Amino acid sequence: MALGEGVSDFGEGQAVFGFVMSGAHAEYLVVRADGAVLPVPKGLELRDAAALPFGGVSALVFLRDYARVKPGQKVLIIGASGGVGAYAVQIARIMGAEVTGVASGGNEALVRDLGAVEFVDYRQQDLGALATRFDSVIDTVGVVRFGQIKHLLTANGVFVPLNFGLREIRQALVSALFGGRRVRIGVSGDTKADLAVLGRWVTDGQLRPVVDRRFALSDIRAAHAHVEGRHRKGAVLLDMVA
Ligand SMILES: NC(=O)c1ccc[n+]([C@@H]2O[C@H](COP(=O)([O-])OP(=O)(O)OC[C@H]3O[C@@H](n4cnc5c(N)ncnc54)[C@H](OP(=O)(O)O)[C@@H]3O)[C@@H](O)[C@H]2O)c1
């Protein structure tokens, strides 16, 4: 790493990890020193640090700022083994919630290991028929509509779809006016403060990177195809240098 003029928070050549909303597949990138970039937490391999920011920051922001998860609450996470979901399960547990994770059966062990106390295989069970009532339902995949899961929410429960369109925008506005069960939508951002929260959780052993597969830059098409298949387990990494 090289430093711009007047930057004193980092050392020349120091290993850093970070996140830019605009994204980049590049060996070198110019970022603001006050942006979402920090030294790699002690004891963490550089390649594992790369697996944290996207899923971790997204999960943190949606659980903390949109679902507003409180200790003791019940949270349903759809896509619990995925890029955001694998972090959402861990972070909801860190926040003191009781997590039910949804994925296919082959990922049950992973999702439970990440901290889910209950698991639902969406290929075997109808989500709409679950008996539990949740304080929040987080859909990281874009597979359910508010109308399909509204009855699974507690009286003031919140549905947080990470993918949303006009329908969810309207539902968020209308449900905010009337109170009760509601939809909250938003974007997750990329701040240094949120990255620092992840770093602290990793350092004290509460959060771990989840790495699915690594691809060489020359296999970028296969990497994108794998991610677009919507069955990744945590983060997919690109090796920039052979
Ligand atoms: N609004 C924002 O600011 C913001 C921020 C970040 C992300 N996002 C969006 O949020 C989404 C996050 O995606 P991601 O990368 O985390 O997803 P992903 O990794 O592609 O999701 C994979 C997960 O979805 C599960 N899954 C696949 N098909 C399913 C189905 N039919 N029903 C239930 N679960 C199913 C998979 O389980 P199995 O493999 O076991 O099938 C796996 O757990 C993206 O669309 C992204 O655009 C939005």
Image (cartoon, helix red, strand yellow):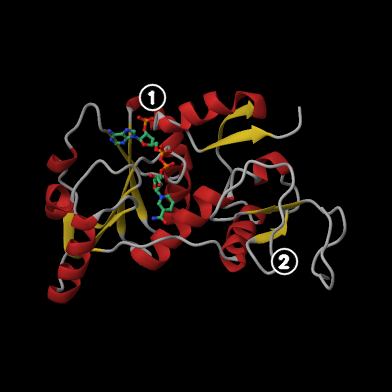
Q: Is residue 7 above or below residue 134?
A: below
Q: Position of residue 177 (x, y in %)?
A: 16, 76
Q: Is residue 16 left or right of residue 96?
A: right
Image quadrant holding the C terminus, namely top right
- Specify whether residue 129 is in view: yes
| Count of marks overlaid on the render | 2
- On residue 33, the disc is 2
Q: Residues within 10 Å of mark 1 (few under 14, many from 20)?
A: few
User: In terms of image quadrants, where is residue 46?
Assistant: top right
Q: Residue furthest right?
A: 12
Q: Amino acid at mark 2?
A: Ala
Name the residue rendered at 47%, 27% in the picture: 226
Name the residue rendered at 22%, 27% in the picture: 124
Q: Residue furthest bottom?
A: 177
Assign a secondary structure to mark 1.
helix
Q: CA distance from mark 2 to mark 1?
A: 41 Å
**Quarter of image, ligand 1:** top left
Q: Amino acid at mark 1?
A: Gly
Q: Is residue 70 above or below residue 212?
A: below
